């Protein structure tokens, strides 16, 4: 990746009950991005890995933008100490805004919401609608089954072998920046092999 990394979108979880290793990794990722003066855009939550991610970045004076549907704000799920909290109508608008004008997407472990967001981003990349790096941070080998499923989709010819270049997998947050920088280029020419 030749252009500078200015802003990164991070998908992660709001669970308070997951292993603390996940929230710790989120906190460290937030600190790492802020230390590199990379803006963070995320789902706007205040608890779990979401809250830890935001707190990590804020502890280093980082810019943190949250994108939260109005109904979640009404349920008091939003983080009120962010640089900016953008309220949107629904989850579809949230996902679109989170990927607009970012230089990379990073996925930390999470539940169905995180996985749904991640798979939609991979689909958009396959269709040439999103062209930037996608990095999965495989804390405690969490993403092993998902990566195996995607590789199975390639092996079964539901996806092209070139689609395996759409994502990078790292084991530690300290590897995220280099994974973004070293990600293979991706262009809208991918539409030429989006279908088999």
Image (spheres, rainbow, N blue to C red):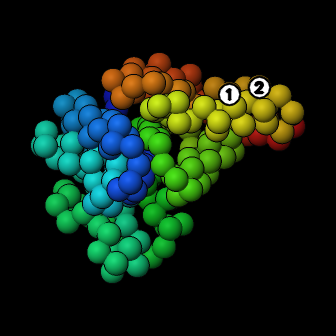
Disc 1 target residue: 164
Mark 1, other Cα within 10 Å: few <14 / some 14–19 / many ≥20: few
**Which image quadrant for residue 175?**
top left
Image quarter of the C terminus: top right
Identify the residue shown where x is 62% and y is 48%. 119
In this rendering, the answer to whether 50 lies above or below 167 is below
Identify the residue shown where x is 56% and y is 22%. 184
x%, y% of residue 109?
47, 43
Identify the residue shown where x is 77% and y is 25%. 161
**Which image quadrant for residue 125?**
top right
Foreground: 140 or 129? 140
x%, y% of residue 138?
49, 31
x%, y% of residue 187?
61, 33
Identify the residue shown where x is 77% and y is 40%. 194
In this rendering, the answer to whether 64 lies above or below 172 is below
Asked whether residue 28 is in view, the answer is yes
Foreground: 7 or 49? 49
Mark 2, other Cα within 10 Å: few <14 / some 14–19 / many ≥20: few
Foreground: 145 or 71? 145
Image quarter of the N terminus: top left
Disc 2 target residue: 161
């Amino acid at each position: 990746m030749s252009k500078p990394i200015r802003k990164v979108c991070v998908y992660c979880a709001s669970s308070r009950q997951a292993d603390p290793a996940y929230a710790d990794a989120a906190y460290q990722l937030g600190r790492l991005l802020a230390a590199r003066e990379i803006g963070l855009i995320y789902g706007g939550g205040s608890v779990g890995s979401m809250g830890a991610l935001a707190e990590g970045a804020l502890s280093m004076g980082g810019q943190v933008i949250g994108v939260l549907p109005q109904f979640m704000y009404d349920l008091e799920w939003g983080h009120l100490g962010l640089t900016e909290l953008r309220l949107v109508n629904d989850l579809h608008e949230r996902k679109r805004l989170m990927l607009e004008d970012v230089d990379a997407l990073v996925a930390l472990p999470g539940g169905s919401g995180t996985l749904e967001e991640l798979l939609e981003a991979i689909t958009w990349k396959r269709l040439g609608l999103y062209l930037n790096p996608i990095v999965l941070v495989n804390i405690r080998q969490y993403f092993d089954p998902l990566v195996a499923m995607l590789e199975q989709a390639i092996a079964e010819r539901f996806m092209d072998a070139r689609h395996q270049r759409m994502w990078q997998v790292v084991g530690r947050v300290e590897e995220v920046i280099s994974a973004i920088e070293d990600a293979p280029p991706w262009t809208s020419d991918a539409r030429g092999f989006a279908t088999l």
